[in-house]
Image (spheres, rainbow, N blue to C red):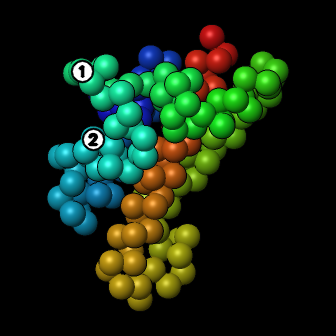
Amino acid sequence: MLGIFCGRVATSGVRAVRDTKIVTAALEGLSGAGAKLGNAFVGWTKGFGKGAGQNVGAAESAFSLASRGGRHAGFLNRAMSMSSKELQRTSNSLQKRIEIHEGYLANPAIHVPNWRSLRPGHQQSLLNHWGQEISTFAEQQSIVEQLLR
């Protein structure tokens, strides 16, 4: 599956599939990237190229990458000092943020009042940004869930 959801698939496959479908639908109409959603997300995620030869055929988990000093290393360091209760609250907070951003993708006009008057390029930039935020929150949530195990 997609590397950004790798950690979530094991614990929350239904949410990962739902998240993927929402982002796919938003991107499909704009750039035809829905069929190649994985490539779009890999382009968004800085640092995913690190260690590419070490994990052939499978995407590296966000936890693994962060533990080697890659993307989200600072988040992992902060999370490692949290109690179980704090980690659970963080996971819940990230899930809420994911759901909020899914709402932005599903109906951008509610979040941006002048949505219809924005240039198509600006609309696409906002959709891409919200999709990137979802992937970031999902990666961070997978790190927290890994620590909770």
Picture quadrant where residue 86 is located:
top right
Which amino acid, mark 1? Val
| Number of the label disc, if any, that sits on residue 19 | none
Neighbour tally class for label 2: few under 14, some 14-19, many 20 plus, Cα within 10 Å:
some
Residue 14 visible to the viewer: no
Q: How many numbered discs?
A: 2
- Residue 28 appears anywhere in the view: yes
Q: Is residue 31 left or right of residue 67?
A: left
Location of residue 58 by image quarter: top left
- 119 shown above or below 54: below
Q: Residues within 10 Å of mark 1 (few under 14, many from 20)?
A: few
The picture places residue 12, in percent across and down from the top left corner, at 48, 23
* Residue underneath mark 2: 38
Location of mark 1 (residue): 56
Please name the residue shown 61% across and 48% down the image: 97
Q: Earlier in the sequence, mark 1 or mark 2?
A: 2
**Rendered-image quadrant of the C terminus:** top right
Q: Nearer the viewer, residue 21 or 81?
A: 81
Describe residue 125's horizontal placement relative to residue 114 as left or right.
left
Relative to residue 38, is residue 44 drawn left or right? right
Residue shown at 65% from the left, 30% from the top: 76
